[in-house]
Image (cartoon, rainbow, N blue to C red):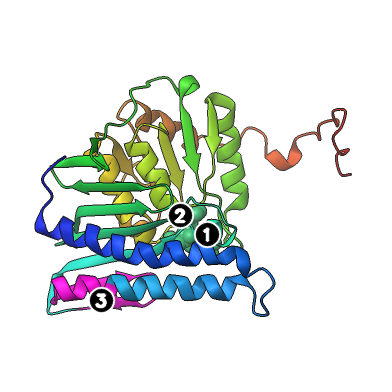
Amino acid sequence: MALRSANLNVMVNAAQKAARGLLRDFGELEHLQVSRKGPSDFVSAADLRAEQILRQELKRARPGFSFLMEESGAETGSDPSRRWIVDPLDGTTNFLHGIPNFAISIGLEEAGEITAAVVYAPVLNEMYTAEKGGGAFLNDRRLRVAARTELSDALFATGIPFQGRPGHLTFLNRLARVMARTSGVRRFGAASLDLAAVAAGRFDGFWEEGLQPWDCAAGILLVKEAGGYVSTVEGAGNPVHSGSVLAANPALHPQLVQLIALEPAVAPAEAAPAEAAPGEAPPAS
Ligand code: 2AM
Ligand code: CA
């Protein structure tokens, strides 16, 4: 295992402490289906409790650092050049539905650059860590992005623009192109873990737009420290604060950028409906 810096230790310890509450709440969820308020209020409360623990722990260890947190927003400390970027529960929808693909994500930004990262998926017992120049790790194992170089062999992850957000048709056109040329596309619903999976070589690449810094700051450092490239979907620019993220190994990164940038040949909405196979519902008309 790599020697962790004092800051990374603070981040790991805070994540482990907050995770205990999340695990307890995740276990409680199944009993809540009949409660009057419903499970989504319960999940919001779980999210807030986790954020409070993270805030407390990080502040106790580093009193002057600033914060950017999903629930409580930005807070400038006595040291404005160092900032924790925190998502207490990435993959909230998964959590709400009893799907264990959720994580705590903590990035440390120093002078505008992400220098340390923790993405912790407590149910999966996966602790991803990285430090600038020090490599990326899953628990004790050093990570390396996948070695595949052909789009046709490659498996990608993405995120679908969520309710109320524009860009669905653009997304569907891009998805159609990537689906047609690659080994497949997955959508797991937690951007921090999608990026961690790129770092681990499980996915060959990932793209998503409309993300917040707390969804992706830590995951981006994981990919870079595992030898991958990360940019915006357009292929240039800083992805952390633009919310547009494209990550892959060095061979596939330019190929994915190019494939996504192509003009649509046929809009998915224009495609002819397929005939129903035996045992399937007929296509809606
Ligand atoms: P969240 O679970 O913390 O909300 C999935 O596409 C990614 O988008 C997740 O990392 C998710 O983080 C983020 N996201 C942000 N706002 C969202 C919303 N309203 N609905 C679904 N996903 C959202
Ligand atoms: Ca999130």
Q: State how far apart marks 3 and 1 are (Cα).
A: 23 Å
Q: Kindly tell me whether residue 239 is visible in this rendering.
A: no
Q: Which residue bears the numbered disc 3?
A: 56
Q: What residue type is labelled 3?
A: Gln
Q: Does the residue labelled 1 lie within 8 Å of ligand 1?
A: yes
Residue type at numbered disc 1: Phe
The amino acid type of the residue labelled 2 equals Phe
Q: In which quarter of the image is residue 148?
A: top left
- First of labels 3, 1 by sequence position: 3
Chain-order first, disc 2 or disc 1: 1
Q: Is residue 28 left or right of residue 111?
A: right
Image-based side of 130 in relation to 237, left or right: left
Taking the image as four quarters, which one is ligand 2 found in? bottom left
| The disc label shown at residue 95, or none | 1
Question: Is disc 3 in contact with disc 2, using a CB cutoff of under 8 Å?
Answer: no
Would you say 244 lies left or right of 226 here? right
In the image, which residues are magenta? Answer: 55-76
SS class, disc 3: helix
Q: Do the residues labelled 2 and 1 touch (CB within 8 Å)?
A: yes
71 part of magenta stretch = yes
Sooner in the amino-acid sequence: mark 3 or mark 2? 3
Considering depth in this image, is 214 or 142 the residue closer to the camera? 142
> What residue is at 36 percent from the left and 78 percent from the top?
72
Q: Quick one: 120 or 238, which is closer to the camera?
A: 120
Percent coordinates x, y for residue 187 in the rendering? 54, 44
Indicate the quadrant containing the N terminus: top left, top right, bottom left or bottom right. Answer: top left
Residue nearest the observer in this picture, 92 or 147: 92
In the image, residue 279 sits, relative to residue 97, either above or below, namely above
- State the residue position of label 2: 102
